[in-house]
Image (tube, grey):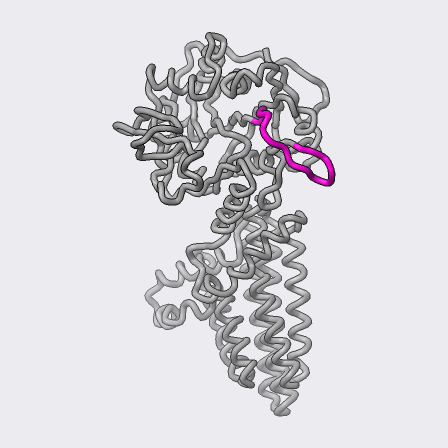
Amino acid sequence: MPKAFNSTAAEIVTEEAENPANHTHSSTDVLKMEHAVILAAGNGQRFQEKGVKLPKVLLKVGGLRLLERAILALNQVGVKHFYIVVGQYRAQIIEIMSKIDRIKALDVNFVYCENHNEGNGVSFGAGASQTNAPFFLTMSDHIFSIPTLQNFVKDVAQNPDIPSLACDANLAEVFDMDDATKVVSRDEKIYDIGKEIPNYDLVDMGLFYFPKGYGQKVARKVENGAKSVSDIINQFIAETGVRTAVVPEALWQDVDNPSMRKEAEKRLVKTLVKKTDGWVSKNINRVFSTRTSMFLSKFNTSPNAVTTFVFFFTLYGAYLVSSGEYMKIAIGALIFQIASILDGCDGELARLMYKGSKFGAWFDTITDNIRYIAFFAALGIAGYVNTGSDIYYYSAIIVTVMGLYTAFIMGRYVWNQGGPLTNLEVTKKVDEANSQSNSFFSQFVNKFRGIEKQDVSAFMLFILCLVGLYQVMFWIAFIGVIVAAITVTKSIGKA
């Protein structure tokens, strides 16, 4: 019986496996998918960190250690119980992983496999024997995007009684095909699998699903002589068959060497770009923000810290603009544009490092709206300073009041949702609700959808201030803030 180390306790305990007899399978059980076995017992290459040699599973990719990323990613799709199979480097792995607060908060069990050198199938058997529930199997050195995991779960739910292997059909996007495990499929099942297969149609992504009771079946196959995961899978292929779950738009990467690590981080950057991004965000802001986020992740930077910096950085820019001097207005507008780029980093870090939170979503929504209000009001003050006209003074007050009202309404909505919801997502929900209305006002506003996006308005503000038309920008903002207040009031309930 393998020894299991619980992440929240120092004592070594021996866990008794449950009896799998007389269990039935149902799609309801599979949809929960609360268990996962992760293999981290290999004797592969090590790397140096601060002069200390560590196993590859502790290598940092995108700010998180490979094993840490595997656990947190699976937790994002509902996995609550983890069985991490460790071998020769168990002491280092357990010591470092047990210091990570988010790992300590989960039910993470480190299972020591004494015979790990005999093959990864032996390690698989040690981990699988710990659970009788449906479970995932993956390797600690594989990364997956959350949508990839979610799509795999959806596919598994359609046929939960047969083991499934996540497969990638987009062969052109596979990095280092020579190292990849190839799959030949027939009738949505594995017909052949291996690294040297000449004619194949899919690639193994290193992520498996096994139904209820299969943990004990795997353990028995190891007891009967199976030494590798391939041995075990081939036996299931011959018995019940193993499904090929083809994951659409799969984003994954095996990390075996420095070039694969570099590729993994490139692919993680792709997960930070949203399909809803506008032209400015996609072609300007994300180019800089994603690289900045990847850099900040190396220092375990909090998304809320970025939000706070962007907020006060913007306020400084607004202070410069309020002077009414052209050079200070231009510098303030440049600061605002830089802040707009950096504003994407908090959400990117939250997605990259799985640090999204209810407070963070609310904080981002409130500060985003307030800093825009402050800057627009500063443009009005600059107009008042340069013209002496009271209309700028009172219009700046109206912008502030209406803007704060809108920020309050949106912030309350985000908080009441009970989970992370970004400012962009709130705006999208408001737009969707508004687009369903047939009123003249709603139809008029719909004609200008896109301009209200923060990346677009920030870039437009920068250009207009740079050419000395800050007053034009103020009046555009004035109208926009009033329209936003009316739209949010009408639409937030529907949203």
Residue 445 or residue 335, whichever sits in front: 335
Q: Residue at x 57, y 44 (%)?
A: 354
Residue 287, given in percent of the width and then of the height, sits at 51, 61
Q: Position of residue 375 (x, y in %)?
A: 61, 73
Give me the residue at 42% from left, 67% from top.
Answer: 450
Is residue 39 shown left or right of residue 302?
left
In the rendered image, the quadrant that contains the N terminus is top right
Seen in the image, is 190 located left or right of residue 131? Answer: left
Q: Which residues are magenta?
A: 40-54
In the rendered image, the vertical position of residue 12 relative to residue 182, given as above or below: above
Residue 466 appears in the figure: yes
**Left or right placement of residue 85 versus residue 438 in this view:** right
Q: Which quarter of the rendered picture does the C terminus lie within?
A: bottom left
Q: Is residue 411 visible?
A: no
Up the image or down, 236 lies above or below 197; here it is: above
Q: Is residue 461 left or right of residue 299?
A: left
Numbered disc total = 0
Q: Position of residue 411 (x, y in %)?
A: 57, 58
Residue 53 colored in magenta in the image: yes
Image coordinates for residue 479, horizontal then vertical, percent: 49, 77
Q: Residue at x 54, y 56 (%)?
A: 290
